[in-house]
Amino acid sequence: MAGAAQHAHWSSRWAFIMAAVGSAVGLGNIWKFPYEAGEGGGGAFVMVYLLFVFFIGTPMLVAELSLGRRGQLSPIGSMKKIAQDEKKSHWWSLIGWSGVVGAFIVISFYSVVGGWTLAYMAKAAMGTFSGIDAETAQNTFVGYISDPVKTLVSHFAFMAITIFIVAKGVQGGLEKAVTVLMPALFAILIILVIYSGFTGDFAKTIDFLFNPDFDKLLFKPNTAEAIAAGEPATRFSLDTVLQALGQSFFSLSLALGSIMTYGSYLTKDVKIGKSAVTIAAADSAVALMAGLAIFPIVFAYGLDVAGGGGLVFMSLPIAFGQMPFGIVFGTLFFGLLAVAAVTSSISLLEPPVSYVEEKTGWNRRKVAVTMGVAAGLLGVLSAYSQGTNLLSDIKINMLGLELDIMGVKDFLTNNIMMPLGGMFTALFVGWFVTRKNMMDELALSDKTFRIWYFLVRFVSPTAIGIIFGKIIFDNFIA
Ligand code: PHE
């Protein structure tokens, strides 16, 4: 059994903030957000996303950090312990389970894309992108993700880095790494935004990202059969709103146990409310900057904004291939993207590791290797589901979407486990934990506490309930 004595802590508030921002800022911001915004129709998606981040996500960050700090155990252990303290059902530990299992699923495909960033860093360094045009950029990407050997190697290389850091523990090299590398990522992004702004189609980007078109967000084309049967060409749907909700959770590292686990390494003197706002602000800033860096190029070269997971990998190389010192910037960018991905993936491996460590009492190294390799093997399915790779023919229908294996894992976690996990967490802290205990743990000012409490008691559960309920209704009842 792991006792409180061996439970690690951050060395300072700054180290914690950098680690939490490191967890939040990752592929979700730079790889996923731009293409989801693109597929979701731009401005309206961005606006709804930001509303979710500030009114649901940030209060959730506060909730999860405080649960972790109070429990001082893995997400499962903490939830069990707090439910017990509060004399509530032990079933609340399911929130912890859903987080730990969800994190295990997510890291299995996160590491695949992490591997892509490593491969692209190498390509950039070797000058592969020099003078590249849009078509070659696309072929390069599809060729790479369709290669069973290359994708396997990069996936396991990325996983090995993650395992190595997690095995070393909380303060080990991680704290030092994040405090240097996160600011560097910011700097490179700013340079890219400026470059794209001057050379790409910036005006169209601003319009696309900030001029909301709610029809695009809320109405989906009807199926050919439905139209033939006399229905209108489009139908009202909350699918994309759910996608934005899931993305806001994903981007803030919520509902997968990561933030709760990082909260468990917090000392009592850190102010959770202020920290949560800092994390959310930094995370949103990076997502928007990624959009501002990528879309000018996408528009300038006539790429498809709804092009899916290849967007970053097919658009930015064109810019790197043309700009002065493109080899340097390209290598730096994909290198830093890899770093951003690593500082997130460690926080995904951490919840399963902390649980197994607690349960078995094995040493950290053994647990990190076991869990990392297991997730890595599960990830092979995702890696091989891309492009024309070995398992790319397998398509599974989920609520009307034809998804490959990676898409299924993403859908299950992003659109189902995370929103539901978030809803139950909000219900737990809002209705089942004693108000006084919550107040003591958070130490917010009276007014801030009341706003927070209102958001988690009413706003989050209702919003998630409505979005989710509508989807269930559309797909299973109507
Ligand atoms: N927030 C990370 C990103 O945006 C991904 C992540 C999700 C990490 C959940 C931990 C937990 O890339």
Image (cartoon, rainbow, N blue to C red):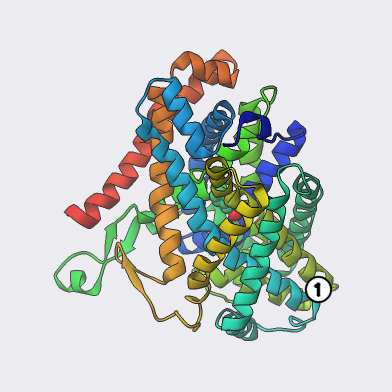
Kindly identify the residue that appears in the image at 42 percent across and 24 percent down: 84
Q: Can you tell which quarter of the image residue 86 is in?
A: top left
Q: Position of residue 248 (x, y in %)?
A: 51, 47
Kindly identify the residue that appears in the image at 47 percent across and 45 percent down: 99
User: Where 5 sits versus 130, above or below?
Assistant: above
Is residue 301 visible in the rendered image? The answer is no
Q: Can you tell which quarter of the image residue 324 is in?
A: bottom right
Q: Position of residue 338 (x, y in %)?
A: 70, 62
Q: Report the front residue among 169 and 114.
A: 169
Q: Is residue 444 left or right of residue 452?
A: right
Where, quadrant-wise, is the C terminus in this rendering? bottom left
Q: Secondary structure at mark 1?
A: helix
Q: Position of residue 426 (x, y in %)?
A: 42, 32
Kindly identify the residue that appears in the image at 59 percent across and 30 percent down: 72
| Residue type for callout 1 | Gly
Q: Find the residue positioned furthest to the left.
A: 229
Q: Is residue 119 left or right of residue 354?
A: right
Q: Which residue is mark 1?
A: 326
Is residue 96 visible in the rendered image? The answer is yes
User: Where 185 sits versus 258, above or below?
Assistant: below
Q: Report the front residue among 136 and 465.
A: 465
Q: Position of residue 189 (x, y in %)?
A: 74, 57
Q: Report the front residue among 344 and 134.
A: 344
Where, quadrant-wise, is the N terminus in this rendering? top right
